[in-house]
Image: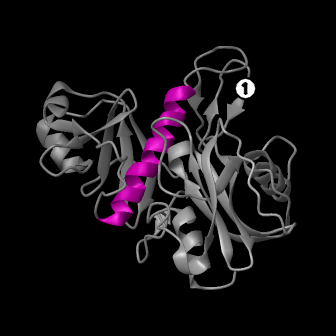
Amino acid sequence: MIQNIDPHHYDNAYHPRPPKAGDRVFFYQDTSTLLNRATGLPFTWEEAQTLADLSGLPVTYFFAIDDTGFHWCHVVPQAIAEAACTEIDCGFYHTAPGWLAFACITATQLHNWYHDHQFCGRCGSMAQPDGVERAMRCPTCGNLVYPTISPAVIVGVTHGSRLLLTKYSRPGAYQNYALIAGFAEIGEPLEDTVRREVMEEVGLPVKNIRFYKSQPWSFSSSLLAGFFCDLDTDDETVTLQEDELGEGTWFDRENMPEGGSLISLTHEMIERFRQGPV
């Protein structure tokens, strides 16, 4: 999955440090990442410094992988813009090596959060990075805001040797087969999210809910929790939530289609069921 970058080590502790040789620096235009046109990767600190004088420009430390720090330069010098291209539409799905793809995706989540929280949501004052932890603090009213992480579930509904797979109905939505998914509501345990989402999307009751694995999913600032559960009836009739789903089909283990991106929890769960009982 996307976060599996062994043998590399992801260090998200908030210990800000200045960029050094070998580090990577991100530049953004709105929400698009600017990459070095020559490599298709984020600029190294040396590459960026060769093109433009970055001294005195505001730079925010993001995180480190092994000894490589990742930073965001808030200003895009003209020379950087001229040497750059934007990330491809797949959003780094195919960036190699995989650990650098994970870095790009996670950096995008952090940049979007910083971009969207420049002002205090309580009093409207300009917010400032907190000096102790990764948060934005309002100097006027003291409001403290942490990076947004939204809990969501991925659900494999099983009935014996059959698994329920779905497709979205929205134009332009991902069209491979997937599992039922949805965000947790306020005050709702994840097990109740599983029951509610399955009932809302396909009209089926479930039982024997069991946790499988979790995954950070920076594309939607989510933390995904994967669950398998069993159909709590002998009637497999699917009643689709048509504004959400265009298809809900039961597949035998031996005849399941491919589903999900290789980096996704959805894909791993489908493949895990294909291998045998879960």
Relative to 241, 92 lies left or right: left
Residue lying furthest top = 124
Relative to 253, 189 lies left or right: right
Vertical order, 194 against 275 (above or below): above
The percent position of residue 224, horizontal first and vertical second, equals 64, 56
Vertical order, 105 against 235 (above or below): above
Residue 13 visible somewhere in the drawing: no
Vertical order, 120 against 133 (above or below): above
Magenta region: 97-117
Q: Foreground residue, 90 or 136?
A: 90
Residue 114 on the magenta span: yes
Query: Count of labels shown?
Result: 1
Q: Which residue is mark 1?
A: 142
What residue is shown at x 50% (from left), y 46% (from top)?
A: 219
**How many other residues sit within 10 Å of disc 1, few (<14), some (14-19) or many (≥20)?**
few
Residue 144 on the magenta span: no
Relative to 165, 47 lies left or right: left
